[in-house]
Image (cartoon, grey):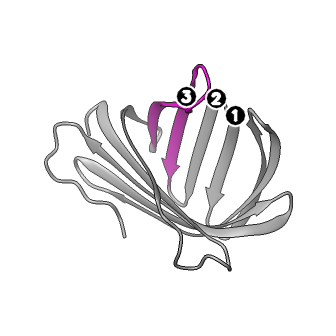
Amino acid sequence: MTKDVLVTIRGMQFTQQQEGDSEPVEVITAGDYYKKNDKHYVIYDEVIEGFDGTTKNIIKLQDGCVDIIKRGVANVHMTFEKNRKNVTCYDTPFGNLMLGIHAKDIRIRERENDISVHVDYSLELNYEHLANCNIRMAIRSKDSADFHICS
């Protein structure tokens, strides 16, 4: 995999009232990739509409675990570990939120020019179930013609 990558992140949230009605949120951006100590790192900047500045995002992938770290306009360190609940504080411009993340399934597929990630998890807000969610990520070399999002 090359240092310069294209990152696609697609997320869905399903509440009991909205099952099937949710629209995915998708981000496609350029980023940097490197591998160190058998862990994959993807770094990219995000602009949050209506706010000055950017948020630096770091995604760390390793066997059975996905970390998403945001620093800037919003700050959080979310850890997704299969069959384990993690609690974190999400610092937003509107105030702090206590998030609970219980990952039910994590699939990471690495190929020569791309990595695909699929995470199914339940999300709690202030210790109450909010939604069942999934995140799909595709990280690929910018010069790669072959590209797939894990399903």
Q: Position of residue 38 (x, y in %)?
A: 45, 44
Near-viewer residue (88 or 72): 72
Q: Which mark is residue 108?
A: none
Magenta region? 40-62
Residue at the image position 55 percent from the left and 52 percent from the top:
66
Q: Secondary structure at mark 1?
A: loop
Taken as a whole, is the magenta stretch helix, strand or loop?
Answer: strand
- Residue topped by disc 2: 71
Q: Residue furthest left?
A: 145
* Residue drawn at (51%, 42%) of the image: 59
Picture layout, residue 31 above or below residue 107: above
Q: How far is the residue under mark 3 from the one under mark 2? A: 5 Å
Q: Look at the image and tell me in which quarter the C terminus lies.
A: bottom left
Neighbor class of circle 1 (other Cα within 10 Å; few <14, some 14-19, many 20+) is some
Q: Position of residue 147 (x, y in %)?
A: 22, 54
Q: How much space separates mark 3 and mark 1, taking CA atoms? A: 9 Å
Q: Nearer the viewer, residue 15 or 146?
A: 15
User: Answer yes or no: do the residues labelled 1 and 2 have beta carbons within 8 Å?
Assistant: yes
Amino acid, disc 3: Lys
Mark 3 crowd level (few <14, some 14–19, many ≥20, 10 Å Cα): some
Magenta segment: does it hold 101? Answer: no
Amino acid type, label 2: Arg
Q: Residues within 10 Å of mark 2 (few under 14, many from 20)?
A: some
**Position in image of residue 52 (x %, y %):** 60, 20
State how far apart marks 1 and 2 are (Cα): 5 Å
> Which residue, given by chain and number where applicable, does mark 1 sit on?
75
Q: Are marks 3 and 2 in contact (CB under 8 Å)?
A: yes
Q: Quadrant of the N terminus?
A: top left
Task: Reply yes or no: does residue 41 show up in magenta.
Answer: yes
Horizontally, is 61 left or right of 102 in the view?
Answer: left
- Quickly name the residue at label 3: 56
SS of the residue under disc 2: strand
